[in-house]
Amino acid sequence: MLAADPTKPQTFEIVLPQLAFAIEHLWEWPMARATKHDVLQLLGVWWRAARGDFADNDSSIFWIARIEMLDRDDPSEGLPPARVQNEGGQRGEPEEPGIVVMPSGKATKLNNYQSEFKGLVDAKLPLRLATDIEAVRTKLMAEYPYAIGAIDLMLRDLREGEPVRLSPILLTGPAGVGKSRLVRRLFNDLLGVRVYRYDGGGASDNMFGGSPKGWGNTVPSAPARAVNQTQLSNPIVLVDEIDKAGTSSRNGRLWDALLPFLERETACCYRDVSLDAELDLSWISHIATANSVEELPTPLKDRYRIVKVPAPRLPDLPALAASVLQELALESGEQGFVWPLANDEIEVMGRAWEKAGFSIRKLQRIVAPTVAARNSTAVRH
């Protein structure tokens, strides 16, 4: 590390990848998560040195990093605030944690095409916290008894009372086993962290990373759009069917556009080409789904933690059918008026579901007509 010379960017290549991996995966962090985030911010300066940003500066990288951090508009920018005390010395209500994703000092003037993003400038957006993790786990295990291993791996990064933030996860498994549904249930419904879905199956370009500001139809990156839409600094960005994205690089590839966002040291100072602003997108959690990972490029697979979601089994039917029934009741606004499924109904659905290959997607199509048939034959008073 001491041998890294800002005037010789190539000298960083022998240490940065290993250092970044150690910070993320090997070091123990007994201190607050904010301290780790500050280290990643510092590491981001090192990455900038590696690409030549400070090639004309003969100071040490440690001094350059210190100056860069002090030059920020707010020394605590990017870090969740600590709990505050009132003037009487008593502990007050905890201040809601949040960060400024788009500081004005690192942004140029937005044009008319980007007017909807003006509210992000210098806005402190909240960080959604993980609460009642054990209760969430218990509920998910009851609803998805076939995916307990996947559930535990998805919850592994969460800490009670701390911001929801996961290392990139790639859920893989047969079609129709409920991968996307599990993500929405966990984060949207149970943790209150909104999920921004991006269709990987129809992607044949690199628009995930946005388009240049000079274009008439300029579009910010998908993570920037997720932040603006959810008004959270740590939403979930879900790339569905990432394995079905286009493989041609003529117009760019989704797979390549994803890479900068999956590393926190680059995501914390990402320069959005449409907004022409440096954004802190490092608190976003990235999740993708795929039926298979065989065709995905190695750099992408290296950045994701691959989690397998197995297919459900026939004994799982009562729990899964009850979950689907509740969803149908919520959609119809009749959640208080839907009777549980009877044993004979479960038996009939089981035979149909087995023929359908135990697909959750097809189970929804089996439960709906079952309920409709029950309602049509019900005794009316």
Image (cartoon, grey):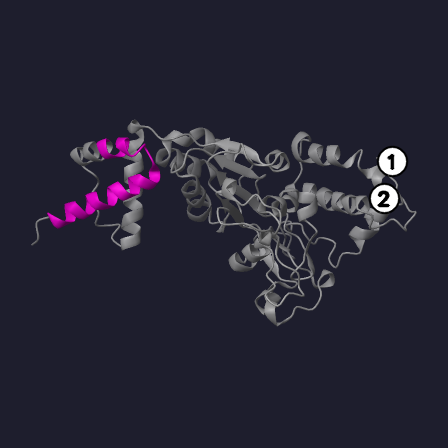
Residue drawn at the location 39% of the way across and 39% of the way down: 178
List x then y, in percent, for residue 208: 58, 52
Classed neighbour count for the residue bearing mark 2: other residues with Cα under 10 Å, few (<14), some (14–19), many (≥20): many
The number of numbered discs placed on residues in the rendered structure image is 2
Location of residue 138 by image quarter? top left
List x then y, in percent, for residue 234: 57, 50
For marks 1 and 2 on the same chain, the one whose residue lies earlier in the sequence: 1
Q: Secondary structure under badge 2?
A: helix
Q: Secondary structure under badge 1?
A: loop
- Which quarter of the rendered picture does the N terminus lie within? top right
Q: Main secondary structure of the magenta part?
A: helix
Furthest-bottom residue in view? 112
Nearer to me, 78 or 12: 12
Location of residue 324 by image quarter? top left
Q: Amino acid at mark 2?
A: Ile
Q: Which mark is residue 61?
A: 2
> In the picture shown, does residue 148 fall above or below 379?
above
Q: Is residue 158 visible?
A: no
Q: Which mark is residue 34?
A: none
Q: Amino acid at mark 1?
A: Leu
- Side of 107 where 189 appears, left or right: left
List x then y, in percent, for residue 42: 76, 45
Classed neighbour count for the residue bearing mark 1: other residues with Cα under 10 Å, few (<14), some (14–19), many (≥20): few
Q: Which residue is mark 1?
A: 2
Task: Tell me how far mark 1 sits from mark 2, CA to CA.
Answer: 9 Å
- Which quarter of the rendered picture does the C terminus lie within? bottom left
List x then y, in percent, for residue 356: 29, 34
Q: Is residue 16 visible?
A: yes
Residue 355 in magenta? yes
Identify the magenta region.
351-377
